Image: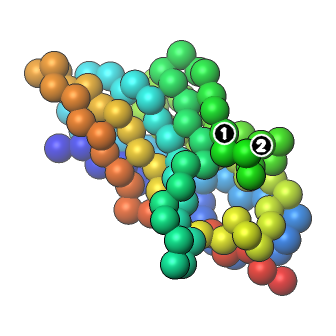
Amino acid sequence: QVQLVESGGGLVQPGGSLRLSCAASGSIFNINDMGWYRQAPGKQRELVARITSGGSTNYADSVKGRFTISRDNAKNTVYLQMNSLKPEDTAVYYCNADVLYYSGRGLLHWGQGTQVTVSS
């Protein structure tokens, strides 16, 4: 059983910063891609950023230059540094991880989500 636990969400003023963390635990052989998605009220879940095991990244256009995704492979953890936050960044943020088990089976896992609210 693999669990992804997110932390770091909260309330921040426009222009402020937050750092999200997502730690994967369980019987993990390896993790390929890891990512952050978000879902605002009444909207579909959308990609924010993704990172490969080798460190290659891609971002949604709306967050380029403001958000930075990184990972610590030794800790099976992915981070999202969010700077210059805007009210439109308000959403529930979810991490996911493409997990490879020792059996050779692969499965995509999701975290439970963490609320980010940008408001004055």
Decide: few, some or many residues near mark 1? Use Cα within 10 Å; few <14, some 14-19, many ≥20: some
Q: Quadrant of residue 60?
A: top right
Query: Circles 2 and 1: CB distance less than 8 Å?
Result: yes
Quadrant for the C terminus in the image: bottom right
Q: Position of residue 117 (x, y in %)?
A: 67, 75
Question: In what quadrant of the picture does the N terminus appear?
Answer: top left
**Residue 105 in the image, given as x and y percentages of width and height:** 16, 26
Residue at screen point 32% across, 22% down: 30
Task: Give the secondary structure at mark 2.
Answer: loop
Inspect the image, locate mark 2, and give the three-letter code of the amino acid beneath it.
Answer: Lys
For residue 99, the mark is: none
Q: Which comes before the other along the chain, label 2 or label 1?
A: 1
Image height of 81 relative to 34, above or below: below
**Which residue was labeled with disc 1?**
59
Mark number, residue 64: 2
Asked whether, in this view, residue 59 is left or right of residue 115, the answer is: right
